[in-house]
């Protein structure tokens, strides 16, 4: 398995991989929808993010992480984190987070944050297990979201 920068041309391959996993949306390990996986949705996310990585094995993509640094300040938002269900528990999440952290650190980022549904304890636990701590709750389009954050050095 290897982690490599994603390219806009990867959109269709990633969409196909996700749909073969019987998912209609990129989900993180705890079931929160994070990214529209239509070819256009993935292409838009990959082009709009400065930090986008795929994890591949011999058969193609098995994971993706997309993050974008804030325009001001030393933070970035994790926009998507997905691992194919057959590869959960193999360290893919950790490898993707680590590679993302390395890239973000090179851009002067010191904190990575994510938003998760506030009514999903499994989502909060997933991020807590990966070093994120709860920062705030905010109103999002789908209801209340917990904002969680981690120091980049903790996941490098």
Image (tube, grey):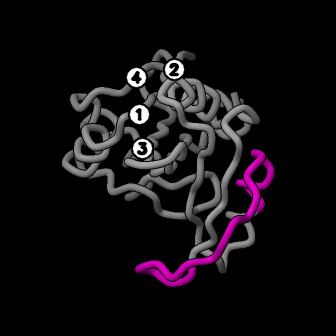
Q: Where is residue 138 in the image (x, y as percent from the top left)?
A: 56, 78
Helix, strand or loop at disc 1?
strand
Q: Counting other residues with Cα less than 10 Å from the Cα at mark 3, is it few (<14), some (14-19), or many (20 or more)?
A: many
Q: Position of residue 50 (x, y in %)?
A: 36, 35
Is 47 magenta? The answer is no
Number of numbered markers? 4
Q: Counting other residues with Cα less than 10 Å from the Cα at mark 2, is it few (<14), some (14-19), or many (20 or more)?
A: many
Helix, strand or loop at disc 2?
strand
- The residue labelled by disc 2 is 3
In the image, residue 21 above or below residue 51: below
- The residue labelled by disc 1 is 52
Q: Where is residue 47 in the image (x, y as percent from the top left)?
A: 25, 38
The residue located at (62%, 44%) in the rendering is 111
Cα gap from disc 3 to disc 4, whole angstroms: 14 Å
| Disc number lying in front (3 or 4) | 3
In the image, residue 115 above or below residue 48: below
| Disc number lying in front (2 or 3) | 3
Cα gap from disc 4 to disc 2, whole angstroms: 7 Å
Residue 137 visible here: yes
> Of the residues under marks 1 and 3, which one precedes in the sequence?
1
- The residue labelled by disc 4 is 5
Magenta residue span: 125-144
Disc 4 and disc 2 in contact, CB within 8 angstroms:
no
Quarter-wise, where is residue 20 in the image?
A: top left
Identify which residue, 136 or 48, lies in the foreground. Answer: 136
> Of the residues under marks 3 and 4, which one precedes in the sequence?
4
Identify which residue, 36 or 79, lies in the foreground. Answer: 79
> Of the residues under marks 2 and 3, which one precedes in the sequence?
2
The residue located at (59%, 66%) in the rendering is 116
């Amino acid at each position: 398995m290897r982690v490599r920068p994603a390219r806009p041309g990867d959109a269709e391959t990633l969409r196909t991989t996700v749909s073969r996993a019987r998912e209609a949306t990129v989900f993180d390990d705890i079931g929160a929808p994070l990214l529209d996986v239509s070819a256009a949705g993935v292409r838009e996310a990959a082009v709009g993010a400065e930090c986008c990585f795929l994890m591949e094995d011999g058969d193609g993509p098995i994971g993706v992480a997309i993050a974008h640094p804030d325009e001001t300040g030393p933070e970035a938002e994790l926009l998507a984190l997905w691992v194919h269900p057959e590869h959960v528990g193999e360290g893919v999440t950790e490898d993707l987070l680590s590679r993302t952290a390395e890239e973000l650190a090179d851009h002067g980022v010191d904190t990575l944050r994510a938003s998760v549904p506030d009514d999903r304890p499994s989502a909060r636990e997933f991020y807590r297990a990966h070093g994120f701590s709860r920062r705030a709750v905010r109103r999002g389009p789908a209801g209340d979201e917990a904002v969680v954050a981690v120091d980049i050095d903790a996941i490098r």
